[in-house]
């Protein structure tokens, strides 16, 4: 079987001037890789007609699949569409379906359409429209000499939606892709090198046709198993067997398969077990609640919370003993435990969660340096607390604290804490 | 003066497989831009000899400055150095200074050198060594037909160190770099195409040497003015004059220059004016508070908030009239106004903010479809409210609602709402 060669072209001065990082092409190539398609080249060029024309010319010589992003906005500096028409030697025509879609988007948002917006419905005559439900610029697909070129907006949410719903189905149908199957096992609460020690023996015994990749992110590590073969059923069986073995080694760390976000896995658990939660947040400033409520249907388990940034609110609203704040400080085990217990009682939930710490970048003392953070969880069995010792980056401290408390919650529900 | 054309080539399978995001080239091009050097192309290719040879061939035809990163590690798949030697038709020779440096690094770390490490001191005969104090692979500089090619390791800290200390001084000395100055003007509350209509006349009258770029992001548009000339003082004066004219057209939309985040601009305003805030959130689930508290020092103006997800908490904690919830619904102007006013009074702050809406993806009705969201702001002058009609994406609705309410807050403080 012939390998399909893919390439990605991103168009836009903002990338070449270094104002934004091109994360689109990373996402695209990793998704193509999952389909067994190798990206052999990525190119970024300016919003300049000749540069675009040259690149298109070369791209059709060297690649079966050409993914182009960017330069499709309604403003003057966005010239991709016009240049594509010139490259193929065709005119622009107004597409009624696209126009209706743009109009309905504007109506929904209660805004006036102007001439530039209407122009977004003008597309090269030879293109196949890929419907962009998330924005006004349509995706466009062109064919030439056995190759396919796809042009999409650079806005990540629009591009990803178009790729998943429109482009990948066409690619899989029209190209002969090898059989590649994946399993993604997501873990929380263990670092990459510790995880390597825990699963090292299992990894060394993996069969030749199954590869493992460690994909670390803030606070978590995803494990991706990729199997390649010529029989989908055998491949699935082999992978499931390996995953089964893997899970035996990491019962506390594993939280979900695939693309499930950590907070969504925890939310799902709360929903299934019908457990209600409330939050009393100081240093996380609402982020714990925000994460729990990013889940559609969270009103089933999340009742509410109090963000007690000032000591006055900690005392008045959460009944924290002012004597404890005075003697131990707001960032202390005593205070954070009272916060968790009292929010649970006040909001009548099964579980109460709390945080109090010095998120930084300032406000540290020799005894309590920046990054000193207490978290607590209270339920009918009692109240447990944990001290975190993090770094000096405020945003990262808030994120890591939130992940830690959600992991405490997960452990409590699953019964291993 | 002739423009210097620069390009960046990154070599490495891990980028093309999508395992890592190429942040190096973003950093390099933004640094080159500050020196007045335009990057006209970025390319990522695999660790394959022929692909590298082809790219080098083309690069010397089109660019004065070629920055190559990656493929210099001690392992077999790193073939950049060998391929560069082949391209220039020269042999590798052992460089004693580099060897001494590698040896001293290994001694410092208390590790044994192996054959591969010694090999890092082998460099193409025609290259000028750029000393890499942070790692074992040296930077290498080559000259051919008036162009300069620099090859560096892909490890960010090594690459940045080499660029700053070795490459930039040579570039500035050997090329005649133009003077380029930028101004970034950030706007909120107006879409890209509406903004174009508002500032179109001004844009059309911009002098030839000043260019404008629209850089949209969720809910906001950044405007970047770039001026080019041979006198820095004149250029700064020209740009400041244009920015002055621009700001007259967008007094309500402009919120900051440069790289300031929107929530930080609002936080800065609260801090400067010594205005205290509290929040009563329903559909935003803590996100308004989270944004306000991402600012270091936010405890000066943010006192706290109540996340009232359930109606019970809206009634008990925020004193919302249960009759209004029953007759108008929790998502209504009446309820959201009471939430904003009552949190302000309860938490004794200058301003109270509130949100209540149907964030989705479910929960809509014919009269109140998903995306129907009310926000309110209360201060001593009264309480104002606004209805938003957004889409069906939950996360986006929460973000857009938060941006809208922070913009309401900004307008109220600045006196135009």
Image (cartoon, coloured by chain):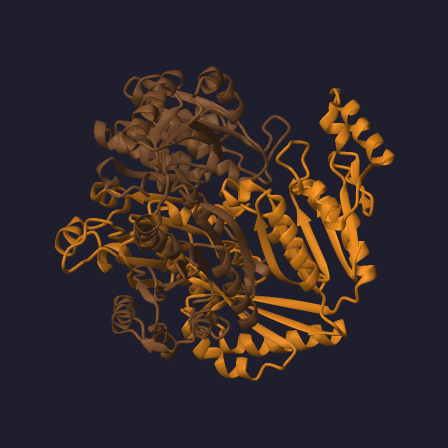
Chain colours: A brown, B orange
Nearer the observer, A318 or A118: A118
- Horizontal and vertical percent for residue B376? 32, 58
In the rendered structure, the answer to whether residue B72 lies left or right of residue A126 reads right
- Horizontal and vertical percent for residue B360? 25, 50
Q: Say which residue appears at 65% left-offset and 74% top-offset.
A: B239
Which quadrant does the N terminus of chain A fall into? top left
Asked which quadrant contains residue A380, the reply is top left
> How many numbered marks are there?
0
Which quadrant does the C terminus of chain A fall into? top left
- Horizontal and vertical percent for residue A94? 31, 77
Which residue lies most toward the front here?
Answer: A1
Nearer the observer, B212 or B177: B177
In the rendered structure, the answer to whether residue A384 lies left or right of residue B210 reads left
Nearer the observer, B117 or A219: B117
Nearer the observer, A198 or B220: A198
Q: Say which residue appears at 79% left-offset and 63% top-offset.
A: B175
Above/below status of A19 relative to A298: below
The reply to whether residue B335 is visible in this rendering is: yes
Q: Say which residue appears at 50% left-offset and 59% top-offset.
A: A61
In the rendered structure, the answer to whether residue A287 lies left or right of residue B92 reads left
The reply to whether residue A417 is visible in this rendering is: no
In the rendered structure, the answer to whether residue B415 lies left or right of residue A44 reads left
Above/below status of A119 relative to A284: below
């Amino acid at each position: 079987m012939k390998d399909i060669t893919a390439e990605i072209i991103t168009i836009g001065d903002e990338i070449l001037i270094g104002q934004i990082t091109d994360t689109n092409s990373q996402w695209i190539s990793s998704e193509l890789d999952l389909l067994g398609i190798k990206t052999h080249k990525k190119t970024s060029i300016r919003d300049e007609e000749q540069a675009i024309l040259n690149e298109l010319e070369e791209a059709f010589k060297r690649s079966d699949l050409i993914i182009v992003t960017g330069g499709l906005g309604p403003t003057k500096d966005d010239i991709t569409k016009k240049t594509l028409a010139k490259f193929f030697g065709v005119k622009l025509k107004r597409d009624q379906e696209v126009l209706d879609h743009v109009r309905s988007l504007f109506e929904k948002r209660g805004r006036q359409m102007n001439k530039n917006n209407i122009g977004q419905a003008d597309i090269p005559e030879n293109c196949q429209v890929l419907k962009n439900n998330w924005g006004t610029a349509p995706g466009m697909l062109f064919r030439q000499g056995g190759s396919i070129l796809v042009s999409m907006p650079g806005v990540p949410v629009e591009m990803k939606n178009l790729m998943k719903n429109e482009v990948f189905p066409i690619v899989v149908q029209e190209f002969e892709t090898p059989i590649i199957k994946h399993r993604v096992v997501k873990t929380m609460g263990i670092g990459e090198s510790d995880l390597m020690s825990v699963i090292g023996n299992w990894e060394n015994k993996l069969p030749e046709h199954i590869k493992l990749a460690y994909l670390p992110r803030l606070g978590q590590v995803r494990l991706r198993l990729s199997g390649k073969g010529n029989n989908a059923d055998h491949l699935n069986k082999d992978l499931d067997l390996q995953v089964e073995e893997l899970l035996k080694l990491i019962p506390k760390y594993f939280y979900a398969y695939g693309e499930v976000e950590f907070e969504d896995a925890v939310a799902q658990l709360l929903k299934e077990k019908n457990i209600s939660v409330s939050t009393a947040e100081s240093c996380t400033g609402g982020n714990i609640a925000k994460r729990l409520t990013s889940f559609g249907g969270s009103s089933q388990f999340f009742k509410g919370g109090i963000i007690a940034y000032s000591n006055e609110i900690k005392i008045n609203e959460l009944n924290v003993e002012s004597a404890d704040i005075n003697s131990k400080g707001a960032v202390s085990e005593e205070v954070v435990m009272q916060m968790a217990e009292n929010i649970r009682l006040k909001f009548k939930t099964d579980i109460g969660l709390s945080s109090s710490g010095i998120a930084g970048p300032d406000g540290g003392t020799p005894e309590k340096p920046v990054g000193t953070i207490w978290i607590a969880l209270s339920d009918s069995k009692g109240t447990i607390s944990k001290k975190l010792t993090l770094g000096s980056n405020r945003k990262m401290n808030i994120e890591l604290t939130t992940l830690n408390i959600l992991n405490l919650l997960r452990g409590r529900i699953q019964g291993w804490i």
